[in-house]
Amino acid sequence: MKSIGRLFVVLLLGIALGLLYGWLVQPVHYVDTAPASLRADYQTDYVLMVAQSYASGQDLQTAQVRLASLGPEPAADHVTQALTYAVDHGFSRYDLDTLNQLAIALREAAPTAEIQSP
């Protein structure tokens, strides 16, 4: 019975030390992660930054490339999702207008041709 108690104490001590090491001594630091791995609020901020960049330079192709890093969905869908999140969470009117400008530009842009297999 004494050995089972020692085993239990050693296991708890090992778990505690492992958690202490993993959380305090050497925690994970994410570097250069893809925007697709961000939470919805940070993805919305990313889309807003893309929209602000588009508003200043009117470079739709660069905006599309940047939005492609959010996943395989069409760029306009990412902006629409960000716009919905922004409305629901009380973003400023200026931010909403900026996102809307990009959404309109993406919807009006001609779809890119896809390469067909032979």
Image (cartoon, helix red, strand yellow):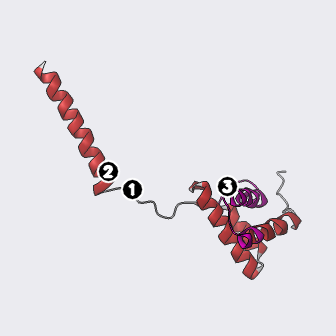
In the rendered view, would you say 11 is above or below 3? below
Disc 2 on helix, strand or loop? helix
Labels 1 and 2 touching (C-beta < 8 A): yes
Residue at position x 63%, y 65% in the image: 45
User: Horizontally, is 78 left or right of 113 in the view?
Assistant: left
The kind of residue on which mark 2 rests is: Gly
Query: Where residue 102 is drawn, which disc sits there?
Result: none
**Quadrant including the N terminus:** top left
Which residue, given by chain and number where applicable, does mark 2 sit on?
22
Residues shaded magenta: 70-97
Where is residue 31? Give x, y as percent.
47, 63
| Mark 1 / mark 2, whichever is N-terminal | 2
Where is residue 90? Give x, y as percent.
68, 62
Where is residue 87? Give x, y as percent.
72, 59
Q: Residues within 10 Å of mark 2 (few under 14, many from 20)?
A: few
When asked about the image quadrant of residue 79, the answer is: bottom right
Q: Is residue 75 magenta?
A: yes
User: Horizontally, is 63 left or right of 14 in the view?
Assistant: right
User: Horizontally, is 78 left or right of 18 in the view?
Assistant: right
In the rendered view, would you say 89 is above or below 6? below
Q: Is residue 84 magenta?
A: yes
Query: Where residue 28 is drawn, which disc sits there?
Result: 1
| Mark 1 / mark 3, whichever is N-terminal | 1
Disc 1 on helix, strand or loop? loop
Identify the main secondary structure in magenta.
helix
Where is residue 42? Give x, y as percent.
59, 61
Q: CA distance from mark 3 to mark 2?
A: 31 Å
Q: CA distance from mark 1 to mark 2?
A: 8 Å
Which residue, given by chain and number where applicable, does mark 3 sit on?
71
